[in-house]
Image (cartoon, rainbow, N blue to C red):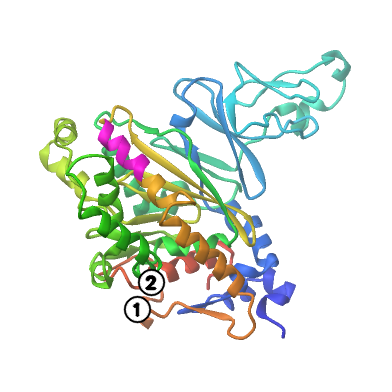
Amino acid sequence: MKRIGDNMTGHTSPEGFRHLVGPDRVHRDLYTDPGVYAVEQARLWTHAWVYVGHESQIPAVGDYYTTEIAGQSLIMLRKSPQEVTVLMNRCAHKGSQLVHEREGNCGKMLRCPYHAWTYRLDGSLLSIPLKNDYEGTNLSSCPSGKGLSSPGASMNYRGFVFVRISEDGPDFTSYFGEALATLDNMVARAPDGELSVLGQPLRSRIDCNWKLYLENVNDTVHPISTHESAASAAKEVAQNLPENGDTVLAMEQLLPFGAGYSFYSEMGARVLPHGHSVLGTKFSIHTGYAPLQDYQMELEASHGQEAAQQILQFSPQNTVLYPSLAAKASPMILRVLRPLAVDRTLVEIWAFAPKNAPARLRQRAASYARLVFSPMSVVAHDDVHLFESQQRGLLCSGNEWLSLHRGYQDSEIGQASASMDSGNNEWVIRNQHRGWLELMGGAA
């Protein structure tokens, strides 16, 4: 049986992509077709603003962190005490990668291990062996003589570093818009305005398409069934616990997964342009965490009592900064998506805290990351099993479509920004696919 995605013309034409995304359903080729994935890498992941890392990962001059986006090897590098840059991890001479470790310190310069060409920390060419042999050649006028390449654009937004691989595409502020409020809130939660990553991230390679994972970030209906066993176990354990200690913190974070459909239906959500969204505009499973009085007093001293209260009250379930990032303000967690193949995704879980945060606040973020996102946790284990089950199930013959009908109304078509009362409305997921279509060049 021939499917929509089996025609390569359909893969590359805007009309073909429009056929894959309906107003209330999407075609399975979005998740299973290698041709669609290849075009995503060439279009969507190069024209969107994609998260690279946080400046606290590279605190000293010469520190670097490497990652890969859309097949491009990138270096996030501390070039001065005040400045971070992003460079292509490719020697201008013959293309060798300059650094091969995930992170490290290159000293005062970058040196290619192949022919020893060296570069300043801003990427400009510093020296080359046998320099005299290049006199009279065209090296200085060609790209190889001008130093290292950079992505089309980069932005250090309050410590959060993003790139747009392509020279063409939206500017940073207009692309993210209101979605940046969650990153602003994270920074505001630091009394001195400085955040820091809490050690290394949790990394999981999941055998599913990246969009299945990102949709689940906004799926409020699945916890009731998917995480029923985890919530039930937490409830049973919590009945016999003392009032203090790490186990109580774990229960504080696990018990809300047992909240019913009505809880999620009342938390509210907001869709934003380009696939971004905020789930939990009114409250979330994180809203009920016990206050930390000394920390709250520090915030009030920095921001004033009323502003501090507003900062602490904003605790969305998840903010999606499409396509690469899902953020929580409390606890401070970033989930970073790195597609590896049509059916394989790397997910990184980064925990954050104010640089001088009290131990309990740091513990809250680190604990949540381990309890909920470690691949062997009682929560993520369920999710990963079902993501991979979805990926296999979508290869079955028969129904070629995935339903996104819950809460759909024709009036939502054409609304770039809108708030809704129910967090159970799949509009937040439909909105991701409209952002996908726009970035793939198929928007009407």
**Eyeballing the image, is 123 above or below 247?**
above
Residue 172 location, x and y as percent? 46, 47
Which is the main secondary structure of the residues drawn in magenta? helix
Question: What is the tally of numbered marks visible in this picture?
Answer: 2
First in sequence: mark 1 vs mark 2: 1
Rendered-image quadrant of the N terminus: bottom right
Vertical relation: 152 (above or below) 176: above
| Direction from residue 211 to residue 225 in the image, left or right | left
The residue positioned 61% from the left and 48% from the top of the image is: 166
Q: Where residue 99 sits in the image (x, y, percent)?
A: 67, 29
Magenta-tinted stretch: 359-367
Question: Which residue is at a point 35% across and 66% down the rendered structure image?
Answer: 228
Q: Quadrant of residue 43?
A: bottom right
Q: Which residue is mark 2?
A: 427
What residue occupies the far front of the structure in this picture?
Answer: 240
Q: Amino acid at mark 1?
A: Gly
Q: Position of residue 44 (x, y in %)?
A: 58, 58
Q: Secondary structure at mark 1?
A: loop
Q: Amino acid at mark 2?
A: Trp
Q: Which residue is mark 1?
A: 407
In the shown orientation, is residue 204 left or right of residue 371? right
Residue 248 image offset from top left, x and y in percent: 24, 46
Crowd class of label 1 (few under 14; some 14 to 19; many from 20; radius 10 Å) = few
Q: Which mark is residue 360?
A: none
Give the residue displayed 24% in from the left and 67% down from the top. Answer: 263
State if disc 2 and disc 1 touch (CB < 8 Å): yes
